[in-house]
Amino acid sequence: MKKGILFLFLALGISTASAQLFSFGIKGGVNNNSNGNMSEVSGFIGNLDVKSIEEAGYHFGVFGEINLPLWLYIRPELNYTHTESSYKLDGNKQALEMNKIDVPVLAGLKILHWGRIIAGPVFSYMIDYRSVEL
């Protein structure tokens, strides 16, 4: 009987520990971004410096979190990102739209139960981009 109860507590403890080892979720949001300025574009005489007008974009994706010992964790993500910027030159207005896949691989440190420090590289793959005259 004692061995059965001990086995039950161990089984519950192991299943709880494995459930805490890995978690996942979804994410999404709105971006206020600029795709950068155009300067010194070939084919123009003189210096060309066109500033971008910030536009709204969006992103959504999934993430996983692998807990490691000592409050450390690894958080890989897979995100789809859409950005837009407008450029105005000599009365003409153009929009640049970009769609890409971002794959951040982040390492983090949990501070108490309310804070985190996260750092790591982001790998990006450009799906497509296009310029639209407005």
Image (tube, helix red, strand yellow):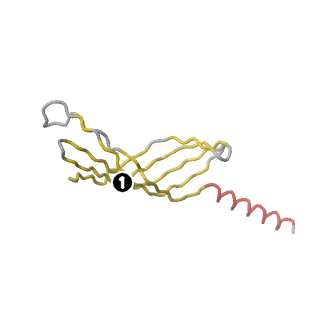
Q: Residue at x 32, y 50 (%)?
A: 84
Is 103 or 5 nearer to us in this picture?
103
Left or right of 54 on screen, residue 76: right
Is 127 or 39 nearer to us in this picture?
39
Left or right of 99 on screen, residue 16: right
Is 34 or 53 nearer to us in this picture?
53
Q: Secondary structure at mark 1?
A: strand
Quarter of the picture containing the N terminus is bottom right
**Image coordinates for residue 36, horizontal then vertical, percent:** 31, 40
Q: Residue at x 47, y 56 (%)?
A: 28
Is 14 or 115 nearer to us in this picture?
115
Whether 117 is drawn above or below 102: the answer is above
**Image coordinates for residue 114, horizontal then vertical, percent:** 65, 46
**Image coordinates for residue 92, horizontal then vertical, percent:** 19, 47
Whether 2 is drawn above or below 120: the answer is below
State the residue lying farthest toward the top: 46
Q: Residue at label 1?
A: 82
Left or right of 121 on screen, residue 100: left
Amino acid type, mark 1 = His
Estimate how packed mark 1 is, as few (under 14), some (14 to 19) or many (20 or more) residues with alpha carbons within 10 Å. many
